[in-house]
Amino acid sequence: MPAKFGALGAAIARKTATYIAFFCLLFWVGFPVYYMLITSFMDSPELGVKPPHWIPQKPTIENYREVVIGETGQRGSYGSTTEFSRMMPALLNSTFVSVAVVLSNLLIGGMAAYGFSRFDFRFSRFAYLGILMTRVLPALSLIVPLFIILRKLKLINTLWALIFTYTIFILPLTIWILREYFDTLARDIEEMALIDGATRWQAFRMVVAPLAVPGLIAVGVMSFMEAWSEFFFALTLTNSLTYPPLLMSFRNLAQVNWNALAAATTVGVLPPVIVAFVFQRYLVRGLSEGAVKG
Amino acid sequence: MAAVRARKTSAQERQHWDRKWIPYVLLAPAIITIVVVILSPLVTTIYYSFSNIDLIRDRTTFIGFDNYVELFTSRLFWKAVEINLKFAAIVVVVPTLMGLFFAVLLVEDFVGRGLGRTLLILPWALPWIVIGLLWNWVVHSQFGALNGLLYSLGLIDKYIPFMADENWALVFTAMASAWRQTSFSAILLLAALQTIPEDLYDAAKVDGAGMRARFRFITIAWIRPTLTIVLLYNIVLGFLQFDAVWIMTQGGPGDATMLISVLLYRYTFINFDLGMGAAVSNVLGLITMGVGLIFVRLTYRSQSTYS
């Protein structure tokens, strides 16, 4: 009887510990995000209240209205009309850049990964290792020569500079993950298709590509998020055309409107957050395979 | 029969013919662009680091190791190294331990596990720049969430200007990075934990292994390769972080959060001393590549021991 009692006690202790830990997780992840969210629904006087209102007393969507229409409303002294009016164009630009990066990355990276996976040719091992090594280079350090190259190509302060740069910096990871995928796909089915008279392109399209869809989704989502989030190249190669550097310039305004900034931040992170939640499963798998294998 | 053979031969021939040039076509776009955009700037940066670049007169002079000598004898550089080591220590220890903690929690079966796993993705999905802003709100001296919380709980009677203090500024910039890396680490470790076969634990229980022994000899042993990778990523980030620190402090107050990457930015974009900037970036590159190589070797060795 005491033994059974002890087992029950242990089970209760375990459940309690689990929920305490769960609360820690909720607090750790949720607290900063929650605070930004409530700030975005407050007006400036309420933000300064001591002790803070943990739930907005008179919630307002005024901040979101300002961000969306790019005006600062009656509170003319805060923020700057001209800066906030760049928000919507920046979101459009970010969308364009991210989608273009996903497509070009999947195309170029997919081709290269398939090449590495299916063919053994002169220098193939050397080229593969060389590509992988570029992953540990600090991107920060390549900016000056890169700037010079892009200026020669007349791409500075265009979205193409970002598309070009992001695509190529994400390529090594793409090639790495997709090669793993192609390597594990049943080769014999593909060989059979070839023997049956399919061309390589047909075999790729009918056999390999459909099987590789989860890998392609994982890589596509990861490159979308990277392209949406990248800050440093966007700051140095363009004049705040996309969302991350624009956010920095809101932050650096002489008189920061913290409430509007919170709203702008919330609106701008919706795309990557939604994409991450929707494709959670693929993402986790791609992430762990990309990080761990190789 | 003959027809089948003929078909087969032609397929083989075509395949043979494929093999000669198709891989080069497949790889050309990737390799050419990587050479242009990554490798050629790398070579240029190495060359710059041995040069004095006069932007006004547009003149580049080869000066050997002078930039490196100047760098290694400057107090500023060693200060940046010291600050960066402290920063990296937090960014390695906190996320790895907390990540492991959350991962172990989220393999448990309990109501709310799904919510926990989904929430875990959130910090990882946010841009670094946004993470810097979020933590700005947390530590702000007038309306910061942390000050508000401590005040609400009655632990302080006036708000603390955390970011004006050198030590707190370093701790909180590091915590912002740790916040996101905790998620990343937990996601990877959780994926590894889920692959542990349940019967290993059952067998250990039968053999009389206690909870601590099971954790150490089964859980940790099983996820060790992943743990190594997590450590590697966190160390590399500890040295390459720039965005989140830049938006929070721009290296300040004073030089309190001047990481090596911030020093690199200052040399290049504020002093326009491209030669020194290149020297700093090569040192930084060597550090991260060194870390990478050490860990790759360790991983391969541990893999061959265990399999």
Image (spheres, helix red, strand yellow):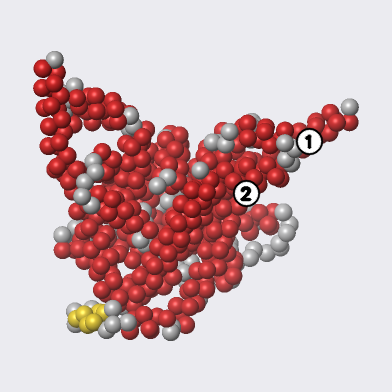
Rounded to the nearest whole Å, what is the CA distance between mark 1 and mark 2? 39 Å
* Quadrant hosting residue A280: top left
Of A280 and A195, the residue lying toward us: A195
Residue B2 image-quadrant placement: top left
In the rendered structure, the residue with mark 2 lies on which chain? A
Choose between B93 and B263: the one closer to the eye.
Answer: B93
Who's the residue at 27% across and 84% down the image? B63
Q: Residue at x 27, y 59 (%)?
A: B38
Q: Residue at x 19, y 43 (%)?
A: B23
* Percent of width and height locating residue A183: 33, 37
Name the residue carrying label 1.
A10
Mark toward the start of the polypeptide (1 vs 2): 1
Residue displayed at 80% across by 31% down: A8
A257 on left or right of A231: right
Mark 1 belongs to chain:
A
Q: Which residue is mark 2?
A: A53
Helix, strand or loop at label 1? It is: helix
Q: Nearer the viewer, residue A190 or B36?
A: A190
Which quadrant holds residue A254?
A: bottom left
- Observer able to see residue A69: no
What amino acid is found at the position of numbered circle 2 in the picture?
His
Residue B248: x %, y % from top left: 48, 63
Q: In the displayed orientation, state which residue is furthest to the top.
A: B1
